[in-house]
Amino acid sequence: GNSTVEKVILPSTLQIIGKHAFDGCVNLKYVFIPEGVTEIPNSCFKGCTSLEQVVLPNSINVIGQNAFEDCKSLKHLSFPSQLRTIDDFAFMHSGLEIFYPTIAEGVKCLIHERAFSFCPNLKKATLSPGVRLAGMMSFIYCENLEEVVFTEEGQGLPGPVETMLIGCNKLKKIIVHAPVTENKYNFNSEKWDTGSFGHCNYNHIVVMSEPK
């Protein structure tokens, strides 16, 4: 990676960014990506430890594997409304403080394996309407995560839901859409093979969302 570049404004004619394009640009702080680009490819900004601001267009459908891994200074990101895939390890070890994407109506956005794992600053994660857990252990070991919100029924298959929060030891509550007695979500991971990551059971902190 280039160790001197601090700011990148990509031209409006650009449609495709190459894999590993900015991998290891340790002094990069600001990136503007124009409308029309549809994918942030694998490892695109991996290891950009100074990256603070990324302007993503709503045309982005895919955030690739390890795309923002180790972006420790990236505290906030406005997620594109047409986003359909947040791939494996996309934000692992990143600095994100909040996850609350606003996905366009009718769009399904799938979160894959360990996409937000080991994010030490993440305090709250909201699976807004349209967001689905597709991969196992998506938010594991976010050690300061306190609150997780599910906004509708069926936001993930059993495995991805039950293993989502292993190692999130500061978790205070999980808010679900249905009355707790009708809650179909289970947050006990014991029946899944999670390797060396251990297990969790958070069923005792599940509460129902307040009616609006």
Image (cartoon, rainbow, N blue to C red):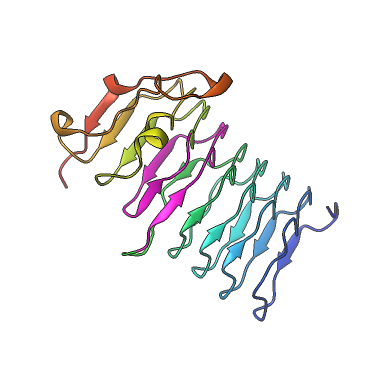
Nearest the camera: 208 or 75? 208
- Is 131 magenta? The answer is yes
Which residue: 68% across, 58% down?
30
Instruction: Reply above or below: 39 against 1.
Output: below
Nearest the camera: 86 or 174? 86
State the image coordinates of residue 105 (x, y, percent, origin top left). Answer: 31, 64
State the image coordinates of residue 127 (x, y, percent, origin top left). Answer: 36, 45
Answer left or right for 137 relative to 19: left
The quarter holding residue 11 reads bottom right
Answer left or right for 149 relative to 33: left
State the image coordinates of residue 104 (x, y, percent, origin top left). Answer: 36, 64
Which residue: 17% across, 47% down?
212
Nearest the camera: 145 or 202? 202
Kindly report the secondary structure that dominates the magenta region of the rendered protein.
loop
State the image coordinates of residue 22 (x, y, percent, origin top left). Answer: 75, 56
Extent of the magenta region: 107-136
Which residue: 47% across, 41% down?
135
